[in-house]
Image (cartoon, rainbow, N blue to C red):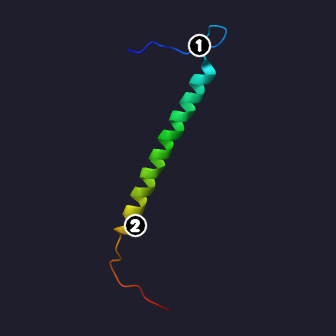
Amino acid sequence: MKTDYKYDSFGNLDTDFYVEKAYELRRAYYAAAFKKMKANVIAFFANLTVSRPLKSA
């Protein structure tokens, strides 16, 4: 288990560092999730077929 923590100049945990790290991880997760969701939506509509012919006006 890794127990190396980052501290600020006053000896406290560097919360700004860890909050920014959390934002970074969250952005990466959401980017990957939306990319996968977009690919699934595109694949769904690509495989969609029309069951009966379309009428033109």
Numbered label attached to residue 7: 1
Residue contact at pointers 1 and 2, CB within 8 angstroms: no
Instruction: Please report the residue visible at 34 percent of the width from the left and 74 percent of the height from the top.
Output: 49
**Dot 2 corresponds to which residue?**
45
Counting labels gives 2
> Is the N terminus in the top left, top right, bottom left or bottom right quadrant?
top left
Estimate how packed mark 2 is, as few (under 14), some (14 to 19) or many (20 or more) residues with alpha carbons within 10 Å: few
Q: For the point 47% across and 40% down, which residue is it?
A: 29
Instruction: Left or right? Give the position of 11 relative to 38.
Output: right
Q: Which mark is first along the chain, 2 or 1?
A: 1
Residue drawn at the location 60% of the way across and 23% of the way down: 17
Tell me residue 41's x, y (percent): 42, 59
Q: Residue at x 55, y 28 (%)?
A: 21
Tag 2's secondary structure? helix
- Left or right, 39 with respect to 24, comes to left
Q: Secondary structure at mark 1?
A: loop
The image position of residue 52, as x and y in percent, is 34, 82
Rendered image: mark on residue 27: none
Residue at mark 1 to residue at mark 2: CA–CA distance: 51 Å
- Which of 13/30 is in front? 13
Q: Where is residue 45 drawn, in percent x and y?
A: 40, 66
Residue 16 in the image: state x and y as whole percent: 63, 23
